[in-house]
Amino acid sequence: MTRSPFLFPFSSVDTSHLLETLVDNGLDAIVITDGLLTQPGPRILYTNTVFTQMTGYSPSEVLGSTPRLLQGPNTSTALLEQLRHCLQQGQSFRGEAVNYRKDGSEYQVEWSISPVRDADGLVRYWVSVQRDVTQQRQAEEVSCQNEQRYRNIIETTTEGAWVIDPEGQTSFVNDHMANMLGYTPVEMIGQTFFDFMDEEGKQLATRLLARRRAGVREQHDFKFQHRDSRAVWAIVSTDPLYDAEGRFVGALGLLTDITSRKKAEEEMRLFNRVLQATTNGVVVADARQPETPIIYCNPAFERLTGYTLTEMVGRSCRFLQGPETEPEAVAQLRQAMVEVRECQILFKNYRKDGSIFLNEFSLAPICDEHGTLTHFVGVHNDVTARIEAEQQRRELAQACFEMGEMAKMSQLKDDFLSTVSHELRTPLTNMTLALHLLEQESCPERKQRYWQIIKEECNREHQLINDLLDLQRLEAGKRELVYEWLQLQRWLPELLELFQTRTQQRRQYLKLNFDEQFPDIWTDRRSLERILIELLNNACKYTPPDNDIVVGVEAPGSQGQQVIQVTVTNYGIEIPAHELPRLFEKFYRVPQQDRWQQGGTGLGLALVKQLSEELGGSIVVQSGQGQTSFRVALPCLPIDSPT
């Protein structure tokens, strides 16, 4: 005997009324159909009040009809096919589909259908429980769209996004954040954020995590550790995260990489210290204002002139001039400013106390990224003592001329050292100036230009020192030569390969001409390589676009003369005849010939001449008819060879 589901006994009438009340006052629509599956299908036998509210159909409008009247264009045919299959098998079914109300509007319905069988197991009825989930699905869709939108924002932002749980474990990072530290997002998920810090950072992060738990939102700089162990600095904006019950569930951090800025700030502090410590007076004037007023000077300039920065700002540098200031020097300076070019002039200037000093003044224009003049930088060097000393040395040398050549050599050495000191100081001064401008500049393009100036001047200083050392070793006879047999036919093309990219970028055409057969040469490979590299560097520097650079090799003559000649010729450029005798002097540079603005030490050709003579050879230069040639003659055989 089946036990009643009710605790108290009810009559069958009471039970029926109670169940009907429960069905009509529930949240779900109830539809009961007969069990027939033949066309047109099961017919509706009962609907409750919720069904009428949900669909707009009254019981009298649907009784005897099939549930198909609720279907429409957007009802899933695949879902209906699954339903039909379950009904044919006498099985229950659960699904979700688009149905249509009486007024034609769509709604999303979630329903289940269960069979009711008789004593013989035959399906007599189908009971369908339906629930309108339209608003729920719409809310879910909006939530999903919002989540996807926020995810897209996080994934495409230029900032790193990092989410941690209450224990500091990573639950999410975007690609930018992972790339910032050299990882993939998959590698970082599950790791604690302590795994990406050094020991100092871990101690600080522990204190910061405690502040997140206390609900503190803040922004701060923080140092992380890259996968390759280098430091990565970031501005971190952090917010605590809470669940619906207000429990702390972690923190969100948005990170901006400022490693380059930190490095630049550190270098700026160093270079600013250099600028403050240099012994040369440095002045910056604004070329965009009338009279080009001073906007900055360093402490060395204050010491040099006796004026303070406050006294000089806003004034023109003309206040340093006086009765004995040479008008010719002033005219040269004005002309250089009009032509926006560098210049170096020796002035007689006046200090605040009226005393005169000899000022070796260097002017350099500064232009913005568009080539517009913005500032002039002046370097002031008090050379009074040096000039007086040089004058005294010259007078002494003249007086002692008849005492022997040693006094003359001493004077030449002093002059050489004076020139060297100036050449060494000039790149350092230019670096100092660029560093000061870099400290004040905010435009990234201008900063990049100042960095380039610093890099070029560093290379210039390094090359100058190397060239001086090489010359010193050559002149002192301390440079060791290692002789070997060298196959020029194989070696020369390999050497020229070093210049192919450079000449192609400048639309220059590098060519090699030599006889098909000529003997090997007995020489020092390093010296010969240095000779040709210096000559090719000069050729690339001075050759205009769309012109040739030709390296030619001539075999020994038929008269038994065992000398090989290597010629480097560049077309499209000539050197004035009066300049040719000075080309091999130390520190000499042909004026206004550096087409590509690469600069130089003025020692390259002096080295070439010394090296050629060290190898037992010679070098000559010829220029005219739109070309310039350097011809190096070298012995093919050892000097003591009997041939």
Image (cartoon, grey):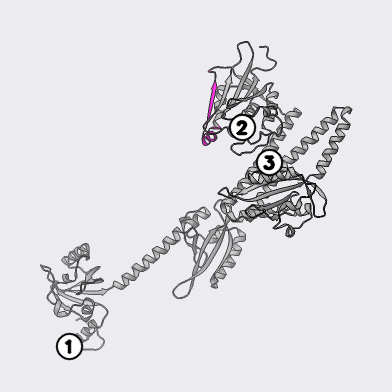
Indicate left or right for 308 with 151 as reference.
right
In whole angstroms, how far apart are the C-alphas of marks 2 and 3?
18 Å
Q: Nearer the viewer, residue 131 or 439?
A: 439
Within 10 Å of disc 2 (Cα), the crowding (few <14, some 14-19, many 20+) is some
In whole angstroms, how far apart are the C-alphas of marks 1 and 3?
111 Å
Q: What amino acid is at disc 1?
A: Val
Label 1 or label 3, whichever comes before in sequence order: 1
The segment highlighted magenta reads 498-515
For residue 366, above or below residue 16: above
For residue 417, above or below residue 489: below
Residue 631: in magenta span = no
The residue sitting at 57% across, 17% down in the picture is: 518
Q: Quadrant of residue 214?
A: bottom right
Residue 505: in magenta span = yes
Judged by depth in the image, the label closer to the viewer, 1 or 3, is: 3
Q: Nearer the viewer, residue 439 or 230?
A: 439
Residue marked by disc 1: 13
Q: What amino acid is at disc 3?
A: Glu
- Position of the N terminus by quadrant: bottom left
In whole angstroms, how far apart are the C-alphas of marks 2 and 1?
116 Å
Residue marked by disc 3: 461
Q: What amino acid is at disc 2?
A: Asn
Label 2 or label 3, whichever comes before in sequence order: 3
Q: Quadrant of residue 21?
A: bottom left
- Give the image location of residue 434, x and y in percent: 65, 49
Is residue 214 visible in the rendered image? The answer is yes
Local SS, label 2: helix
Residue marked by disc 2: 538
Within 10 Å of disc 1 (Cα), the crowding (few <14, some 14-19, many 20+) is few
Within 10 Å of disc 3 (Cα), the crowding (few <14, some 14-19, many 20+) is many
- Whether tag 2 and tag 1 are in contact, CB under 8 A, the answer is no
- Give the image location of residue 150, x and y in percent: 42, 64
